[in-house]
Structure formats: C-alpha cells, structure tokens
Image (cartoon, rainbow, N blue to C red):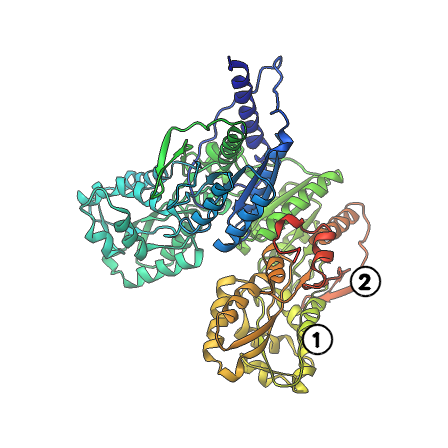
Amino acid sequence: MREKPFRTLLLLVALLAVFAFTACGTNTPPTETPEEVEAPEEEAPPAEEEVEEPVEAAEFRVGVVLPTREEPRWIQDETRFRDAFEEAGYEVEILFSEGDSSRELANVQDLITRGVEVIIITPHDATAAAAAAEAARDAGVQVISYDRLIRETEAVDYYVTFDSVAVGEAQAQYLVDNATGTDNPLYLYAGAASDNNAFLFFEGAWNVLQPKIADGTFYIVNSDEAVALQDKAELTREEMARILGQITTEWDFDTAKSLAESNLTAATAEDKGDVFILAPNDGTARAIADAFAADADVTSYVVTGQDAEVASVQYIIDGKQSMTVLKDVRTLVADAIAAAIAFLNGETPEATTTYNNGVIDVPAAPSEVITVDQNNVVEAIIDSGYWPADEFTGLDTLGAEEPTADLTGAVGVVLPTREEPRWIQDETRFRDAFEEAGYEVEILFSEGDSSRELANVQDLITRGVEVIIITPHDATAAAAAAEAARDAGVQVISYDRLIRETEAVDYYVTFDSVAVGEAQAQYLVDNATGTDNPLYLYAGAASDNNAFLFFEGAWNVLQPKIADGTFYIVNSDEAVALQDKAELTREEMARILGQITTEWDFDTAKSLAESNLTAATAEDKGDVFILAPNDGTARAIADAFAADADVTSYVVTGQDAEVASVQYIIDGKQSMTVLKDVRTLVADAIAAAIAFLNGETPEATTTYNNGVIDVPAAPSEVITVDQNNVVEAIIDSGYWPADEFTGLDD
C-alpha cells in the first residue's frame, strides 16, 4: 500500500502552495507575459497531522534557468523559487541567461556538472532552447519548461504554464463584450514570434474574434495578412506567423508604441473614432494606449492586457487601460516546485492536457486566469493580496478605502519605477532594514510619472509620515513633491538623484557621482597608448542631475588628454567645439548631452552607437575608447561596436555592477564597471532618516548645489572593477554570489 506516502506528498505540495502564496503576497508580482493563473484555495494540513519532508531531501538538487534580469518579473520569480525550495529542504541553483541562448545552454551545462537532477527552464528563444533541453536529457536530467514552452525537441518532460489560449480568449471576449453595432475598427498586436506563448495567446484571441469579424462586428485595420485570412476559423502556425510578422511588439514598450503610432499615421479618420485594441500584455498595452490617447481622431478605445502589473492596474483605475488578465505567478511557482518534487521522488506530475511543441505532446496542468477591470480590481488584486492597496491611488473612487492609518514616526519612500530591477531591489532593502530597525515604512513607486510622484508624496503626508525619501523621476519636476512635503512639515531626503530647483531638500544620500565619472574616464586614460585614439562619448538622461555629475567627472579627466592629443572626439561636434575648456557650464554640458544621451535606455544607446558607427570613417574605428554612462548602456554600446568589422578592439566603461555586466567583464565584452554598493546607500538613507526622526542632523561632509541651495551630503565611495579584481570586489565582498556567473575559474 502507498496510501500514506501519497497523502504525505499531497500535504507537502499543499504546504508549498500555501508558502508560495503567502510568502509572496507582499512581494512584487508579474511583469512579463506568458500564461494565466487563478490562485488555488489551499487548506492547511490538520493540526494533529505532521507533514513529513522528503527523506534525505538535501541530496537532491534542482536547477532553475531564467531568461533575463532586465525584466523585474524574473527577479521576483528568482526570489520565490529560492525561498520556496529552501523552505522545502531542497537545494536549488538559479542562473540567468541574460537574453542569450548560448548563455542559456552554458547555464544548463553548468548545472549538469553540479549534479542537479531536475532543471526548470524558461527559454529566451523557444526553439533555440531545444539544445539546452537536449543537453539535460542526455545527462539524465529531467526538464520542466516554465512559463514558455521549449519547442522542436523531445527533451521536455513537463510544462508548467497558465492556459495561454484562455488568456487570448479572455482578452478577445472583453473586446466583444464591449462592442456594439457593426464596423468597429479593430487593431491587432501580438508578442514576439520567438515566444511560443505569443502564438497561443493569438490563437485564443482569434478563436473569439474571427466569428465577430466574419459577422461584421469588427473590421481589421492594421494587418493585411489578417484581413486575407479573416474567413478562416482556424489558422495554421505558418499563417499566424505571417500575421505576427506585421503586428509583433517583440514584448517591448518602445516597439509597441512606435508600431501603434505608425498604424495610426497610416489609418484614415474613419478607421479611428471608437476603436478596439488587442494588446498582448500590460507593458505593450500601456504603450499602445498612450499612442491612441494622443491621437485627436480617436474618440475612445478599449484595450486589453495581461499580467496585472502595478502600472497597468493603476492605468485601469485611472481609466487608461480597459482590462488585464491576472495570471497569479505565486501559483505558477508552486506548480513548478510541485512538479520538480514529483520528479525527484520518482513520480509523475499531474497532467490534465498536453501542448504540442512541434515534435511531441508535452504534458501539463495549466492554471486558470482571471479577467480584471474596474469592476473587480479591488476584489481580484487588493483583497486577494496580490498587490497591496498602498501601491495605488484612486481606489476610493472605485469603492475601496485607501489606507489612512496614522503612521506617526514612520518613513515614506518614493522610488521612480518598477521597470528597472535596481529599484525593486532597493524596495526590498529599504523594507527589511527599516523594519529591522523598528520603524514603519511605506514604499510607493512613481512609475516614471512626475504627477504620480507628487500624488505619492501627498498620500504619504496624509498618512502622517515624518520623513520622506525620494528618488526623483525628473530632478526638476520633483521640486513640487519636495515642496509639498516641506509645507507639511515633513523632512525630505533626496536619494541617489538630487532634486533640483527648490529649497525643500534637507539631505542628499548619494555616491560621489563626480568620482564615478572620473573613475570611468581614468580607466580609459590608463588603457590608452600613443596619440589620436578615437573617443566616443555617451551620457545618461538630461532629466537626471546625476548624468551631468557623471559627465562632469569624466570631462575633468578626459579634457586634458584630449587637449594633449591622446584622444580625439568622434561623435559630438558640440564636445569638439568645447574641447579646449577645462570646466564646462551646465548649459554647455547640456548641449553635449543633447547629442550623446542614451536616456539610460538600452535600445536608445544601441541605436545611437550604430548611428555613430555608420557616420564614422574607418580611420575613426580600429582601437576605440568609449565612455558609456552605466552598465545597461555599456552592454548595448559594446554589442554595437563588437558587430562593426572595422572596430579592432574597444575599451568601454560602465557603472552599477549589474550581474549581466559583471558577466560581460568576465567574458571580455565590457572592460570595467564602477561598483556603487547599494547596500551602503540604503544604509546611509536609513541612518539619515533615523537621525531626522530623533531630532538630530545627519552627518555631512560636503554639499551639492541643486540650482537654489547647497544640499548637505556625505557621499559614499565607489570602486573600479575589471577582470583583475572582479572576484575580490564582487564575489568575496558578498555583493553577488559566485553561482550567478560562469567563467570565474578561467
């Protein structure tokens, strides 16, 4: 009889599901776009029964390979996986492929050598990931495809997913339910063709939309391939691929917005008015919604989404996005863990259906999804614990009470966006450290919107906070938020970026930003020989005061070496015109930044670098030197220069010591980074806040002028990191664990 072991396994899975649900309830949910989810209703085991953990669990090991750190969703999943597996007594190794299929394969091979028995893979490219899955299968390791289906291989044992077809059906049904009459303009958008889910989402949407196109409820505006196929109830994958080729957003905000704007430019006024938009996920939905909202001929729009991202939930509350499909990732992680444990115990995970990956039918038990709009956003998002109410404004207009508790002695933190992993990590650090110190803290995100930033500060004021820590989205626009706090008697700490053009800043917590630029420039100088070395300059966003400070520091070091002929500037005639000036005014720097800004954006940086290289002569290439402002832009620029046949070698700077850039340094694709240990910065901010709460003044060693006053500060030091000291500075210091990287032993 196997009744007791089977009951024990069921109890363990239930416990894991409960843990995944509760432990992540206050964490930051989704920001991606694979399949759906509805949180299961688990019951805790009876008090009198003890849950048995697997025998000798520690001898089993599970590997997880996630696609990128560039999207917050996967950082959140990393935390969920690590906590849940370790809570269950299983060792787990989690690696990131950083959007590179060859890195994905290397990660799997690395995990195999470490002795894992099960590998959970979210593929970067569904077809290319077949090689990684087959490497695992050949080594006797079982493969779970997580959230995205690995295609064109037999080497997939199980698929953990939401019901992706149902996601598309839910999106399309929402459009149908909100349409009246006939001849409604329909705009179609989809995800990336490299992601199998994009096909499944579109398949589901087509199932619902095609009959309503056939009966005249809708007509398709922006895809002649879809128009040509509109009489077909079922499409082949090849037919869907032709449509996706015209409507793909690549899951990218900027691509989606650009495509929507292009579609609207090509459309007639008759194709606008009251429109209906199939947008594949929340990030693209917001981008597309912004484009349609800006078109004067668009009277109204209904736009779909999925993932229930914080920014899109706010858009729904504000009436700027119509709906989202909630796929509760807490459930998906629990499903993956349950499947892995089943394999480790020599059992087969439950399957209710299969998904064909082009070669085999892969067993799966897809989770359900929930449609969320203004009518049920409170119940589905807030009451379920998926996101806390204090993430949002305007809930009271929907019948929900916003938190109004008096938080005497508390601190408020306003961070600029959830779209960058850095700020999600800071959120966690702030919350943990303040609570450890015995202080209440409320943390809100401005989502790249200065008006939201002001609303967040006003919200924190009404809750009774005494100190607000603000990282401004726009340094000058944030003055309004700082002044609102000052007027309410709340002290303001500007964190990491200086709020400008106001007296209402009490303290500035920062690294020595000028020293960052000096360190970057000094690295270029130290690695240059001879004269007439081509120098390419890039900078951050002009809306961020730090971009000026970084460039000021770099100019301090580079200008004398330009004057003596060591370097000559290739890509900015404004910088060339000013190259004899040792000190630049802010206005002069602004003119240069106008030509070399990356806006802190990967795609903008790569596009600018490619444009610079196209304009440059072969003599301006060869062995080149590149001032790149941070790690994300450094990787983008490095990729562009590495692809140019006339570039013999390059030295490129960075900053932030992001995992992906540390790997680039190890691999010889990025020369250096400046480590600004954010653990120190958070500690400095907390120390300053506590000093203010205690009626004291934080220590200051210098001041920074914000255009109106000199703001006191005690800037933290920075460290230059390259191949020579990467192990000491990054691994030995505990900043990142060694298992994040490959090639450290070389």
Residue 40, above or below 667: above
The foreground one among 104 and 213 is: 104
Q: Residues within 10 Å of mark 2 (few under 14, many from 20)?
A: few
Q: Quadrant of residue 265?
A: bottom left
Q: Identify the residue under disc 2.
A: 701
Q: Residue at x 57, y 68 (%)?
A: 542
Comes first in the chain, label 2 or label 1: 1
How much space separates mark 2 and mark 1, taking CA atoms? 29 Å
Q: Amino acid at mark 2?
A: Thr
Q: Residue 229: image x %, image y %?
A: 20, 50
Q: Amino acid at mark 1?
A: Asp
Q: What's the mark number on residue 540?
A: none
Q: Residue at x 73, y 57 (%)?
A: 729
Q: Identify the residue under disc 1.
A: 526
Q: Does the CB distance between marks 2 and 1 fall below 8 Å?
A: no
Q: Residue 1: image x %, image y %?
A: 51, 12
Q: Residue 596: image x %, image y %?
A: 54, 73
Image-based side of 345 in relation to 35, left or right: right
